[in-house]
Image (cartoon, rainbow, N blue to C red):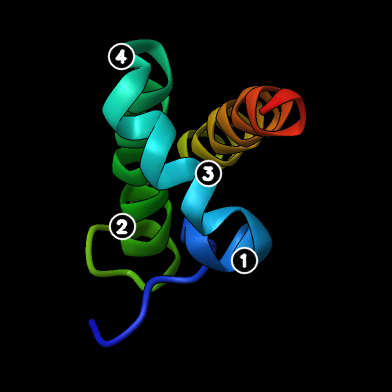
Amino acid sequence: MSNTPHELAEEFPDKVDAMSKLKQSDSHFSKLADDYHEVNRAVHRAETNVEPVEELVEVELRKKRGALKDEIWGILAKA
């Protein structure tokens, strides 16, 4: 896999420094970022049929990724 779409640095390019600092200083943010990365990779593997899953599972993974992204954005917007 050369590139996984929807990486946080690509989603929030102007917040890369803030994300780096928050990962070091805020354990909740760090956990959210790790969870996002894990779910994002699972979505990518499902979309590319590296690890095929049922459509409903893929939809749920996308919803979870969206919810994590929203929560991460909420923290970044306040930082």
What residue would you read off at disc 4? 27
State the residue position of label 1. 13
Q: Do the residues labelled 2 and 1 touch (CB within 8 Å)?
A: no
Q: Are marks 4 and 3 in contact (CB under 8 Å)?
A: no
The answer, for residue 46, to whether it is visible in the render is: yes
User: What is the C-alpha distance between the residues marked 2 and 1?
Assistant: 30 Å
* Residue that extends furthest to the top in the rendered view of this protein: 28
Q: Is residue 5 above or below residue 17?
A: below
Tell me if residue 36 can be seen.
no
* Residue marked by disc 3: 18
Residue type highlighted by circle 2 = Pro
* Dot placed on the residue nearer the N-terminal end, 2 or 1: 1
Circles 2 and 3, Cβ within 8 Å, touching? The answer is: no
Q: Distance between the residues labelled 2 and 4?
A: 32 Å
Q: Which x, y percent locates residue 7?
A: 46, 61
Residue in the picture at 29% in, 34% down: 34
Q: Label 1 to label 3, Cα distance in Å?
A: 10 Å
Ranked by sequence position, the earlier of labels 4 and 3 is 3
Which residue is labeled 2 in the image? 52
Precedes in sequence: disc 2 or disc 4: 4
Question: Closer to the observer: label 2 or label 3?
Answer: 3
Three-letter amino acid code of the residue under disc 3? Ala
Residue 31 located left or right of residue 76: left
Name the residue located 29 percent from the left edge and 41 percent from the top edge: 38
Image location (x, y in percent) of residue 30: 33, 26
Q: Nearer the viewer, mark 2 or mark 1?
A: 1
Give the x, y percent position of residue 17.
48, 53
Location of the N terminus (image quadrant): bottom left
Q: Depth-wise, is mark 2 or mark 4 nearer the camera?
A: 4
